[in-house]
Image (tube, grey):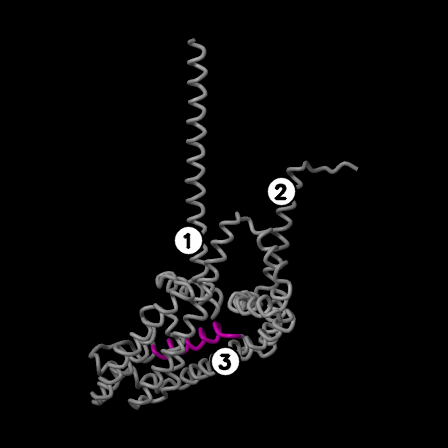
Amino acid sequence: MTNIYTPRQQRILLITSLIIIAGFIIAGLRQYATAFLGAAILFVVLRPWFHSLTRKRKWNVTFVTVLLMIFALIVIIMPFAVLSVLLVDRIQEYARDPSQILDLVNQLEKATGFKITSQQNIKQMISQGASFASRQFPSILGSTLDFIVILGLLFFALYFMFKEEKTFIKGLRRYLPFQQNTLDELGESLKNNVNANVIGQALVSLVQAVLTGVTLWIFGTPDPAFWGMIAFFMAFIPVLGTPLVWGPAALIKFSQGETGEGLGILLVGVIVIINIDNLLRIMLAKRMGDVHPLITLAGIVLGVPIFGILGLVMGPLLLSYFIVLMQVFERQNRQQLVEVATDEAQLKKRVAVKESKSDD
């Protein structure tokens, strides 16, 4: 029986069907997107170790995959999840009883001589901050079942990424609509972003958080462990970072008449913490990939509202991919213009040759 559609119509309908089905799949899995994104990030982070153990040392692939999954759970996922739970729990505690934050604001106003805002606005900001933090951090904060499902999907995807690594990479190269050199550029950009914004930035943030917490503890600032946790997450923000934590702490010390403690916090912050930050970034940029601070800052602002805490990586990655694709588009356009100019020159040459022959 003859089909009523032409080959062109069949192709258009096939593409349309693929897009519609993909849309349903994405819509159905959207609440678990963090699992697949997290698996992709861990795949990039752990892949060099996987190659080292399976190719150089000839270890069993399944054994190495399980070993790396256990390592990721114990060393990366659980500490970060626990830290997130403790942080959000403390923020919610401040939201329920904002008197301590209000006291800090009053002391800052005395130290600077400026009226920051009304107490009602501060209470509202604290409440909104607690709500925002609860939405952005792992789902264990809201539902243990959701967290278990996300964790299970993450490790399920990660297991098959490693177990079927060659098939997985070959499938990406086959079905992504890019040329080989473009895929290489996108892969390099992914590696640089993950290395810089996961491994490198996490190390920098951890060092700065410890230094900030210890500094505040030495100079008698209340609750230094909490402010150290705040410093860990603030350190992901380029330029501003930890000064948003130890700077106000120093001003509060000045407002309380404790000039020595306030001066000590400022000196340690400016001389030690900031310089350690700059030194570590320079050292890590050479080994783990260098991402421009503007891309990181804009990417965080873009990514966190969309992807939650994974937006710290996915936001800069999206901007980097946009820049790479724009460069590819520009290069291909330039190459096409050169080819067109070459064709036109050859055509003119052939026409000139024909005219000269006809004259003869």
The residue closer to the viewer here, 85 or 319, is 319
Residue identified by numbered label 3: 79
Q: Are marks 1 and 2 in contact (CB under 8 Å)?
A: no
Total number of numbered labels? Answer: 3
- The x, y position of residue 128, in whole percent, is 41, 75
What kind of residue is marked 3? Pro
Q: Distance between the residues labelled 1 and 3?
A: 33 Å
135 falls in the magenta region: yes
Q: Residue at x 42, y 35 (%)?
A: 338
The residue closer to the viewer here, 289 or 30, is 289
Q: Residue at x 26, y 78 (%)?
A: 271
- The x, y position of residue 231, in whole percent, is 37, 78
Can residue 34 be seen here? The reply is no
Whichever of callouts 3 and 2 sits on the residue coming sooner in the sequence is 2
Q: Main secondary structure of the magenta part?
A: helix
Residue identified by numbered label 1: 323
**Is 92 above or below relative to 34?**
below
Q: In this view, does 138 lie to the left or right of 168?
A: left
User: Which mark lies nearer to you, 1 or 2?
Assistant: 1
Task: Count neighbours of disc 2 (C-alpha within 10 A) and say few if under 14, some if 14 to 19, many if 20 or more.
Answer: few
Label placed on residue 12: 2
**Is 360 above or below relative to 227?**
above
- The x, y position of residue 242, in whole percent, is 33, 76
Whichever of callouts 1 and 2 sits on the residue coming sooner in the sequence is 2
Extent of the magenta region: 122-138
